[in-house]
Structures are given as structure tokens and as C-alpha cells.
């Protein structure tokens, strides 16, 4: 494990894809569970927030590349396994 200024690789939250819409992820969860739920897209402007949110924010993968981690498997496969293994 490489260390950088005392930060260990397991301290990072890692997301499996470069970019995915929240609505796409939400729909996938219901599809995997075979639930007939209608998920409608919306914007940040549709909700009142206490703190301002950026119009576009994507999680970066610099730490993943820095630590030389292996590429991730497809997100849909990981979601399916997570839902199965955690009884959701």
C-alpha cells in the first residue's frame, strides 16, 4: 500500500464509474430488485438546499490511478452483487 502524506488508500471512497446520472443509478436499483417504481429525472434547482451545490460535479479518480489500483468491473454487476450480498 502506498502512502501519501499519511493518507492510506482505504481512506478513499471509490465509485465504480467515471460518470453516471443519479436517475440512471436509481432506476437500476429498482430494476435489479424487480420493483415497478417510476423514477423521474430532476435537477438540483428542483430542491431547496441549505448549502449551494455545483451544477456539475463528478468524482475524480486521481487517487485510484496514483495508488495503481486495478480497473473496476462494470458498475451494474457490482450493484447486483451488492444488493444480493446485503439482502437489500
Image (cartoon, helix red, strand yellow):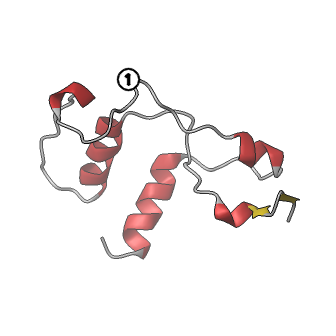
Instruction: Give the left or right position of residue 48, taking residue 15 as reference.
Output: left
Give above or below for 28 relative to 23: below
Q: Name the residue under label 1.
A: 55
Residue closest to the far front: 50
Give above or below for 76 relative to 20: below
Give above or below for 82 relative to 24: below
Q: Residue at 21%, 56% (x, y): give it.
A: 34
| Whole-percent x, y for residue 13 in the image | 58, 56
| Whole-percent x, y for residue 77 in the image | 49, 53
Instruction: Give the left or right position of residue 17, taking residue 84 as reference.
Output: right
Instruction: Give the left or right position of residue 46, taking residue 64 as reference.
Output: left
| Whole-percent x, y for residue 68 in the image | 83, 50
- Quadrant of the snapshot with the N terminus: bottom right
| Whole-percent x, y for residue 33 in the image | 26, 60
Q: Residue at 12%, 48% (x, y): give it.
A: 37
- Quadrant of the snapshot with the C terminus: bottom left
Residue closest to the far right: 2
Q: Quadrant for residue 49, please give it.
A: top left
Closer-to-camera residue (31/50)? 50
Let me know if residue 52 appears in the view. yes
Let me know if residue 43 appears in the view. no
Q: Residue at 76%, 51% (x, y): give it.
A: 70
* Numbered-mark total: 1
SS at circle 1: loop
Q: Residue at 29%, 46% (x, y): give it.
A: 26
Mark 1: give few (<14), some (14-19) or many (20+) Cα within 10 Å: few
Amino acid at each position: 500500500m502506498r502512502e501519501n502524506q499519511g493518507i492510506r488508500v482505504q481512506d478513499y471512497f471509490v465509485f465504480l464509474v467515471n460518470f453516471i446520472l443519479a436517475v440512471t443509478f436509481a432506476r437500476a436499483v429498482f430494476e435489479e430488485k424487480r420493483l415497478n417504481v417510476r423514477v423521474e429525472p430532476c435537477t438540483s434547482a428542483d430542491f431547496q438546499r441549505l448549502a449551494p451545490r455545483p451544477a456539475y460535479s463528478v468524482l475524480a479518480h486521481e487517487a485510484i490511478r496514483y495508488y495503481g489500483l486495478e480497473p473496476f468491473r462494470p458498475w451494474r454487476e457490482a450493484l447486483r452483487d451488492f444488493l444480493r450480498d446485503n439482502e437489500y
